[in-house]
Image (spheres, helix red, strand yellow):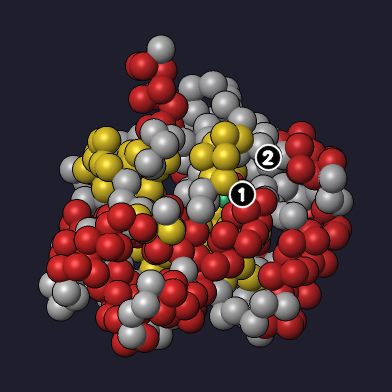
Amino acid sequence: MTDILGLYPDELLEFITGLGEKKYRGRQIFEWLHVHKAASFSDMTNLPKSLRDRLSAEAFISDPSIIECQVSSIDGTRKYLLSMRDGNMVEAVFMRYHHGNSVCVSSQVGCRMGCRFCASTIGGLVRNLSTSEILSEVYSIERDTGERVSNVVIMGTGEPLDNYDNVIRFIKLLSEPEGSNMSQRNITLSTCGLVDRIKDLSKEDLKITLAVSLHAPSQEKRLSLMPIAGKYDYSDVIKAAGEYAKITGRRVTFEYSLVADENDSDEDAKLLSDQIKNILCHVNLIPVNPVRETGFHEPDRMRVERFRTKLEKYGINVTIRRELGRDIDGACGQLRRRYMRNQD
Ligand code: SAH
């Protein structure tokens, strides 16, 4: 069976002409898939019935089932638990901002990076998601809400640069002018800092925003939170992010999860700004989302504000992540974990 949603336009044309059909049928199908977000060949009403039957026999359209959808009564954020064809489940989140609707997608089932504060990594990596599965997270949410999604953040479960080829293809397909046509400027990829892959990414000629999960002001502290720091040194992560900004002209984001008494002191703020002050960047502060298994706590609001003010004093641009969906299983991986616990 051909995984049709993951094909580039030229590959789809090749597939269709291989079935003995005219090229324009390929363009029609691409439009059904990526503009109208059709989940079934039977919806493709301008195709002859014989072709629709043939397609159903030879190809499939990724269309996860919605196992659960939690809706925040505070801000309307919708957190989905989606089941893929093989029964593996991932989370995706729909958020409304003044600049449009945003979806946070997962790039893997589970994760092998082992960050100590993160719920997604607790059960390890199960498998990579295919390009079509990642796309289907966005498309199934658009179908469910009946609303268009204008922004995507690759910040759900998984390390996107650990699933490099599928994620790059996802970005290119999502921004394909004949299809969804999402502006690459509205796509953010968040990585725990796989230096070699950041270097590859900077050569892809994409206009996406790179977010790097830094979470610490020094190699030593980073290593205590993120095992990946044992492979890539702090200074190399900063350097790769700086190079990315230089090559692409795009401002990078450093994500910094504030953990009480771990990385939230005045000295931490000073050290952090010393490391990044020469880079086209801004810092996104995320008060750590408590996860039952991790034991980490967020600093109180005053301490978060103090950290922000310190960074600003040193000339760093700072935002504090708006907390959406606080009343639903907010942190990455928590909904899936709870669901899996209940199954045991
Ligand atoms: N693997 C990628 C993307 C997934 S996580 C990465 O590491 O960037 C998206 C962001 O949420 C990362 O910055 C991650 O470190 C952070 N994060 C994960 N669990 C968190 C928690 N419990 N509280 C706050 N931030 C968390």
Mark 1 C-beta closer than 8 Å to ligand 1: yes
Amino acid type shown at disc 2: Met
Residue 199, label in figure: none
Residue ID at (61%, 35%): 125
Amino acid type shown at disc 1: Glu
Mark 2 C-beta closer than 8 Å to ligand 1: yes
Q: Does residue 12 appear in the picture of this structure?
A: no
- Determine whether label 2 and label 1 are within 8 Å by CB: yes
Estimate the spatial distance between the alpha carbons at disc 2 and disc 1, rounded to whole Å.
7 Å
- Secondary structure under the numbered disc 2 in the rendered image: loop
Q: Quadrant of residue 101?
A: bottom left
**In x, y percent, where is residue 172?**
51, 74
Q: Does residue 177 appear in the picture of this structure?
A: yes
**Vertical placement of residue 334 versus 302, above or below:** above
> Upstream in the sequence, badge 2 or badge 1?
2
**Vertical placement of residue 19 versus 41, above or below:** below
Residue 113, label in figure: 2
**In x, y percent, where is residue 239?**
82, 67
**Vertical placement of residue 177 versus 135, above or below:** below
Residue ID at (65%, 43%): 264
Q: Residues within 10 Å of mark 1 (few under 14, many from 20)?
A: many
Residue ID at (26%, 41%): 66
Residue ID at (73%, 83%): 247
Residue 159, label in figure: 1
- Secondary structure under the numbered disc 1 in the rendered image: loop
Q: Nearer the viewer, residue 106 or 236?
A: 106
